[in-house]
C-alpha cells in the first residue's frame, strides 16, 4: 500500500512539475538547475527513500539544510542548525579583534 502512495505522489509531482515548467516559460523566468537544491523533510522514524528530482533530465541536488532569508532550515525541521549558526555569529561579534590599528 505504501508503494502505491509513493507512485501516486510521484505522478502528482511530475504533473505539477510540467505545469510549473510551463508557467516559468510563460513568465520568462529562468530556473538554474545546477544551483538549485531541494530539501526532503524527514522524521525520527524516517525510512530511507531513494528520491530523485529531475529537471530537463538533470538531477537536482538534495541538501540536508538550506539557508533561506536568513533562516537555516534543516531536513528535520529542528532549530538546532539555525541556533548554532546564530550563536557562532554572536560569539564573533563579542570577541574583540586581536590586532588593532
Image (cartoon, rainbow, N blue to C red):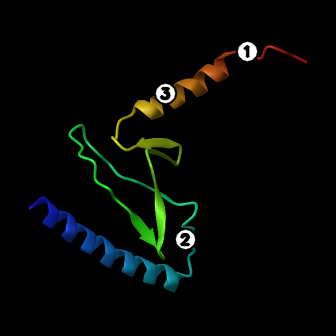
Q: Quadrant of the N terminus?
A: bottom left
Mark 3 and mark 2 in contact (Cβ < 8 Å)? no
For the residues marked 3 and 1, what is the alpha-carbon distance in whole angstroms?
20 Å
Camera-side residue: 21 or 49? 49
Badge 3 or badge 1: first in the primary sequence: 3
Return the mark for residue 45. none
Query: Please, what secondary structure does the residue beneath circle 2 have?
Result: loop
Compared across the picture, whether 92 is left or right of 83 comes to right
Return the mark for residue 84. 3
Q: Quadrant of the C terminus?
A: top right
Within-10-Å neighbours for mark 1: few <14, some 14–19, many 20+? few
Please provide percent x and percent y for residue 17: 38, 75
Which residue is at 60% across, 20% downward? 91
For the residues marked 2 and 3, what is the alpha-carbon distance in whole angstroms?
31 Å
Camera-side residue: 74 or 79? 74
Return the mark for residue 96. 1
Please provide percent x and percent y for residue 40: 35, 52
**Residue position for label 2:** 31
Farthest-out residue, right: 101
Camera-side residue: 28 or 46? 46
Badge 2 or badge 3: first in the primary sequence: 2
Camera-side residue: 19 or 91? 19
Badge 2 or badge 1: first in the primary sequence: 2
Mark 1 and mark 2 in contact (Cβ < 8 Å)? no
Which residue is at 68% across, 15% downward? 95
For the residues marked 2 and 1, what is the alpha-carbon distance in whole angstroms?
42 Å
Please provide percent x and percent y for residue 11: 25, 74
2 vs 1, front mark: 2
Amino acid at each position: 500500500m505504501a508503494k502505491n502512495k509513493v507512485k501516486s505522489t510521484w505522478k502528482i509531482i511530475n504533473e505539477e512539475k510540467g505545469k510549473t515548467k510551463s508557467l516559468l516559460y510563460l513568465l520568462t523566468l529562468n530556473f538554474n538547475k545546477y544551483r538549485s537544491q531541494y530539501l526532503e523533510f524527514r522524521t525520527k522514524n524516517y525510512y530511507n527513500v531513494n528520491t530523485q528530482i529531475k529537471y530537463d533530465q538533470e538531477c537536482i541536488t538534495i541538501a540536508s539544510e538550506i539557508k533561506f532569508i536568513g533562516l537555516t532550515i534543516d531536513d528535520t525541521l529542528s532549530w538546532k542548525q539555525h541556533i548554532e549558526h546564530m550563536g557562532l555569529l554572536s560569539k564573533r561579534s563579542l570577541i574583540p579583534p586581536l590586532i588593532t590599528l
